[in-house]
Amino acid sequence: MGMKAASRELFRILPPPVDLYVVAGHGRSLKHWTSIGYRSLPGVLECGLWDALDSAPPVEGRSAGLITDIGNDLLYGHSADDLMRWLTEVVTRTRPHVDELVLTHMPTFSFDRLTPLAYQTFSRFFMPNVKPRPYEKMRSDLTYVSEAIDELAASVGAVTVKPEPEWYGVDPIHLRLTKKREAWRAYVESFATGEEVGEERSGVSILFARPAEMRVLGRVVRTKQPIHHDKSVKLNLY
Protein backbone atom coordinates (compact mmCIF):
# COMPACT_ATOMS: atom_id res chain seq x y z
CA MET A 1 0.00 0.00 0.00
CA GLY A 2 2.99 2.33 -0.16
CA MET A 3 5.66 1.83 2.48
CA LYS A 4 7.39 5.09 1.57
CA ALA A 5 4.26 7.03 2.46
CA ALA A 6 3.74 4.89 5.55
CA SER A 7 7.26 5.43 6.87
CA ARG A 8 7.05 9.19 6.30
CA GLU A 9 3.90 9.42 8.38
CA LEU A 10 5.26 7.21 11.14
CA PHE A 11 8.47 9.21 11.34
CA ARG A 12 6.42 12.42 11.37
CA ILE A 13 4.63 11.51 14.59
CA LEU A 14 6.96 9.09 16.41
CA PRO A 15 10.09 10.40 18.13
CA PRO A 16 13.29 8.38 17.65
CA PRO A 17 14.40 5.76 18.23
CA VAL A 18 11.75 3.75 16.35
CA ASP A 19 11.84 -0.04 16.13
CA LEU A 20 9.72 -1.20 13.17
CA TYR A 21 8.53 -4.73 12.45
CA VAL A 22 6.98 -4.75 8.98
CA VAL A 23 5.13 -7.45 7.06
CA ALA A 24 4.66 -6.10 3.54
CA GLY A 25 4.30 -7.25 -0.05
CA HIS A 26 1.73 -6.99 -2.83
CA GLY A 27 -1.03 -9.58 -2.63
CA ARG A 28 0.02 -10.93 0.75
CA SER A 29 -2.18 -13.69 2.18
CA LEU A 30 -2.82 -13.94 5.89
CA LYS A 31 -2.16 -17.67 5.83
CA HIS A 32 -0.61 -19.05 2.63
CA TRP A 33 2.45 -18.49 0.47
CA THR A 34 1.60 -16.27 -2.51
CA SER A 35 3.49 -15.39 -5.67
CA ILE A 36 3.67 -12.14 -7.61
CA GLY A 37 5.96 -12.36 -10.61
CA TYR A 38 9.24 -14.10 -9.79
CA ARG A 39 8.99 -13.85 -6.00
CA SER A 40 6.90 -15.61 -3.38
CA LEU A 41 6.23 -14.58 0.21
CA PRO A 42 4.90 -16.58 3.17
CA GLY A 43 1.53 -15.82 4.68
CA VAL A 44 1.46 -13.35 7.54
CA LEU A 45 0.84 -16.13 10.05
CA GLU A 46 3.68 -18.23 8.63
CA CYS A 47 6.41 -15.56 8.45
CA GLY A 48 9.19 -14.87 10.95
CA LEU A 49 7.48 -11.89 12.58
CA TRP A 50 6.09 -13.83 15.50
CA ASP A 51 9.35 -15.42 16.60
CA ALA A 52 11.00 -12.02 16.29
CA LEU A 53 8.38 -10.34 18.47
CA ASP A 54 8.50 -13.10 21.07
CA SER A 55 12.29 -12.84 21.35
CA ALA A 56 12.52 -9.03 21.19
CA PRO A 57 13.65 -7.14 24.31
CA PRO A 58 11.00 -5.28 26.34
CA VAL A 59 9.74 -2.13 24.66
CA GLU A 60 10.89 1.15 26.14
CA GLY A 61 8.11 3.67 25.63
CA ARG A 62 4.96 3.27 23.58
CA SER A 63 4.21 0.40 21.23
CA ALA A 64 1.61 0.35 18.46
CA GLY A 65 0.43 -1.98 15.72
CA LEU A 66 -1.38 -1.46 12.41
CA ILE A 67 -3.12 -4.26 10.49
CA THR A 68 -4.21 -3.25 7.01
CA ASP A 69 -4.74 -4.58 3.48
CA ILE A 70 -6.94 -7.30 4.94
CA GLY A 71 -9.06 -8.59 2.06
CA ASN A 72 -6.56 -10.27 -0.26
CA ASP A 73 -7.63 -13.77 0.73
CA LEU A 74 -11.13 -13.18 -0.62
CA LEU A 75 -9.59 -12.51 -4.03
CA TYR A 76 -7.61 -15.74 -3.71
CA GLY A 77 -10.90 -17.60 -3.38
CA HIS A 78 -10.79 -18.32 0.35
CA SER A 79 -14.00 -18.08 2.32
CA ALA A 80 -14.97 -15.14 4.49
CA ASP A 81 -14.96 -17.48 7.50
CA ASP A 82 -11.37 -18.53 6.72
CA LEU A 83 -10.30 -14.91 6.35
CA MET A 84 -11.81 -13.95 9.70
CA ARG A 85 -10.34 -16.98 11.45
CA TRP A 86 -6.88 -16.06 10.18
CA LEU A 87 -7.36 -12.37 10.94
CA THR A 88 -8.49 -13.20 14.45
CA GLU A 89 -5.29 -15.17 14.98
CA VAL A 90 -3.19 -12.29 13.63
CA VAL A 91 -4.91 -9.85 15.97
CA THR A 92 -4.72 -12.21 18.95
CA ARG A 93 -1.00 -12.75 18.45
CA THR A 94 -0.30 -9.07 17.86
CA ARG A 95 -2.29 -7.59 20.74
CA PRO A 96 0.01 -8.64 23.64
CA HIS A 97 2.93 -6.85 21.98
CA VAL A 98 1.31 -3.43 21.49
CA ASP A 99 -0.31 -0.77 23.65
CA GLU A 100 -2.44 0.46 20.75
CA LEU A 101 -3.80 -1.43 17.76
CA VAL A 102 -5.47 -0.14 14.59
CA LEU A 103 -7.33 -2.23 12.01
CA THR A 104 -8.28 -0.70 8.68
CA HIS A 105 -11.44 -1.60 6.83
CA MET A 106 -11.55 -2.75 3.23
CA PRO A 107 -12.69 -0.23 0.56
CA THR A 108 -16.08 -1.90 0.16
CA PHE A 109 -17.45 1.18 -1.59
CA SER A 110 -15.15 0.32 -4.49
CA PHE A 111 -17.11 -2.89 -5.00
CA ASP A 112 -20.37 -0.95 -5.00
CA ARG A 113 -19.04 1.13 -7.89
CA LEU A 114 -18.45 -1.96 -10.04
CA THR A 115 -20.95 -3.58 -12.34
CA PRO A 116 -20.94 -7.40 -12.35
CA LEU A 117 -18.97 -7.33 -15.61
CA ALA A 118 -16.41 -4.85 -14.26
CA TYR A 119 -16.04 -6.96 -11.12
CA GLN A 120 -15.33 -10.07 -13.18
CA THR A 121 -12.84 -8.13 -15.32
CA PHE A 122 -10.90 -6.71 -12.38
CA SER A 123 -10.92 -10.03 -10.53
CA ARG A 124 -9.46 -11.90 -13.49
CA PHE A 125 -6.90 -9.13 -14.05
CA PHE A 126 -5.59 -9.18 -10.46
CA MET A 127 -5.99 -12.92 -9.89
CA PRO A 128 -5.92 -14.57 -13.35
CA ASN A 129 -5.56 -18.08 -11.91
CA VAL A 130 -8.53 -17.80 -9.54
CA LYS A 131 -12.15 -18.14 -10.62
CA PRO A 132 -14.04 -15.12 -9.25
CA ARG A 133 -16.84 -15.90 -6.84
CA PRO A 134 -20.32 -14.75 -7.93
CA TYR A 135 -20.94 -11.02 -7.71
CA GLU A 136 -23.65 -11.23 -5.03
CA LYS A 137 -21.59 -13.71 -3.02
CA MET A 138 -18.67 -11.29 -2.94
CA ARG A 139 -21.01 -8.50 -1.87
CA SER A 140 -22.35 -10.54 1.04
CA ASP A 141 -18.84 -11.66 2.04
CA LEU A 142 -17.59 -8.07 2.11
CA THR A 143 -20.52 -7.05 4.31
CA TYR A 144 -19.90 -9.97 6.65
CA VAL A 145 -16.16 -9.27 6.95
CA SER A 146 -16.70 -5.54 7.54
CA GLU A 147 -19.08 -6.24 10.42
CA ALA A 148 -16.78 -8.94 11.79
CA ILE A 149 -13.80 -6.56 11.76
CA ASP A 150 -15.72 -4.10 13.94
CA GLU A 151 -16.67 -6.86 16.36
CA LEU A 152 -13.12 -8.22 16.49
CA ALA A 153 -11.63 -4.78 17.09
CA ALA A 154 -14.09 -4.05 19.88
CA SER A 155 -13.31 -7.37 21.57
CA VAL A 156 -9.60 -6.54 21.90
CA GLY A 157 -9.81 -2.79 22.46
CA ALA A 158 -8.53 -1.88 19.00
CA VAL A 159 -9.43 1.11 16.81
CA THR A 160 -10.84 0.77 13.29
CA VAL A 161 -10.29 3.22 10.44
CA LYS A 162 -12.38 3.32 7.28
CA PRO A 163 -10.77 4.41 4.00
CA GLU A 164 -12.21 7.35 2.06
CA PRO A 165 -13.69 6.89 -1.44
CA GLU A 166 -11.54 9.68 -2.89
CA TRP A 167 -8.40 7.70 -2.06
CA TYR A 168 -9.24 5.28 -4.88
CA GLY A 169 -9.60 5.79 -8.61
CA VAL A 170 -10.27 3.37 -11.45
CA ASP A 171 -8.31 0.70 -9.59
CA PRO A 172 -10.78 -0.44 -6.91
CA ILE A 173 -8.30 -1.92 -4.41
CA HIS A 174 -5.08 0.11 -4.58
CA LEU A 175 -4.62 3.62 -3.26
CA ARG A 176 -4.11 6.40 -5.79
CA LEU A 177 -0.49 7.54 -5.82
CA THR A 178 -1.51 11.08 -4.92
CA LYS A 179 -3.54 9.88 -1.93
CA LYS A 180 -1.19 7.40 -0.29
CA ARG A 181 0.27 9.83 2.20
CA GLU A 182 -3.16 11.16 3.14
CA ALA A 183 -4.40 7.62 3.69
CA TRP A 184 -1.46 6.61 5.83
CA ARG A 185 -1.77 9.79 7.87
CA ALA A 186 -5.33 8.78 8.73
CA TYR A 187 -4.26 5.22 9.54
CA VAL A 188 -1.53 6.17 12.01
CA GLU A 189 -3.01 9.36 13.45
CA SER A 190 -4.06 7.65 16.67
CA PHE A 191 -0.40 6.86 17.36
CA ALA A 192 0.50 10.56 17.45
CA THR A 193 2.04 11.88 20.65
CA GLY A 194 0.89 15.45 20.05
CA GLU A 195 3.80 17.47 18.68
CA GLU A 196 5.05 16.44 15.26
CA VAL A 197 8.62 15.24 15.11
CA GLY A 198 8.91 16.14 11.45
CA GLU A 199 12.02 14.09 10.79
CA GLU A 200 12.27 12.46 7.36
CA ARG A 201 15.00 9.92 8.18
CA SER A 202 15.48 9.54 4.45
CA GLY A 203 18.17 6.88 4.79
CA VAL A 204 15.49 4.28 5.47
CA SER A 205 14.23 2.50 2.36
CA ILE A 206 12.67 -0.88 1.69
CA LEU A 207 12.25 -0.45 -2.06
CA PHE A 208 14.88 -3.08 -2.82
CA ALA A 209 15.14 -4.56 0.67
CA ARG A 210 14.77 -8.28 1.18
CA PRO A 211 12.46 -9.76 3.81
CA ALA A 212 13.64 -12.38 6.26
CA GLU A 213 12.36 -15.14 3.98
CA MET A 214 11.19 -15.28 0.38
CA ARG A 215 11.39 -17.51 -2.66
CA VAL A 216 12.93 -16.26 -5.88
CA LEU A 217 12.16 -18.46 -8.88
CA GLY A 218 11.48 -21.27 -6.41
CA ARG A 219 14.74 -20.85 -4.47
CA VAL A 220 14.49 -19.94 -0.79
CA VAL A 221 16.34 -16.72 0.06
CA ARG A 222 16.83 -15.74 3.70
CA THR A 223 18.08 -12.36 4.86
CA LYS A 224 19.25 -11.46 8.34
CA GLN A 225 17.20 -8.80 10.09
CA PRO A 226 17.16 -5.92 10.78
CA ILE A 227 17.78 -4.71 7.25
CA HIS A 228 18.42 -1.17 8.49
CA HIS A 229 19.73 -0.03 11.85
CA ASP A 230 20.95 3.40 12.89
CA LYS A 231 20.56 5.61 15.93
CA SER A 232 16.99 6.60 15.06
CA VAL A 233 15.46 3.61 13.23
CA LYS A 234 15.65 -0.16 13.28
CA LEU A 235 13.70 -1.80 10.45
CA ASN A 236 12.83 -5.50 10.40
CA LEU A 237 11.09 -6.80 7.26
CA TYR A 238 9.20 -10.07 7.04
Image (cartoon, rainbow, N blue to C red):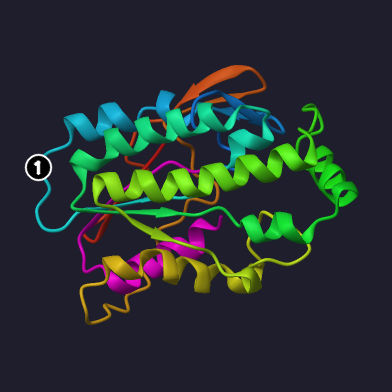
Closer to us: 189 or 15: 189
Q: Residue at x 55, y 42 (%)?
A: 144
| Disc 1, SS | loop
**Residue 214 against residue 190 in the figure, above or below:** above
| Residue 151 point in image, percent of width and height | 37, 46
Count of residue discs = 1
**In the rendering, at what x and y percent does residue 167 appear?**
62, 69
Q: Is residue 202 visible?
A: no
Residue drawn at (51%, 68%) of the image: 183
The residue at the point 21 percent across, 48 percent down is 98
Q: Residue furthest top?
A: 219
Residue 135 on image: x %, y %: 78, 42
Residue at 67 percent of width and 30 percent of height: 76
Q: Nearer the viewer, residue 19 or 138?
A: 138
Magenta segment boundaries in residue numbering = 1-24
Residue on which the image places disc 1: 58
Question: Which quadrant is the C terminus positioned in?
Answer: top left
Query: Does 223 sit left or right of 58 as displayed?
Result: right
Q: Amino acid at mark 1?
A: Pro
Image quadrant holding the N terminus, namely bottom right
**Would residue 91 be seen by someone viewing this image from the given angle?**
yes
User: Dot 1, how many residues are within 10 Å of its Cα: few (below 14), some (14-19), or many (20+)?
Assistant: few
Question: In this image, 64 relative to 62: left or right?
Answer: right
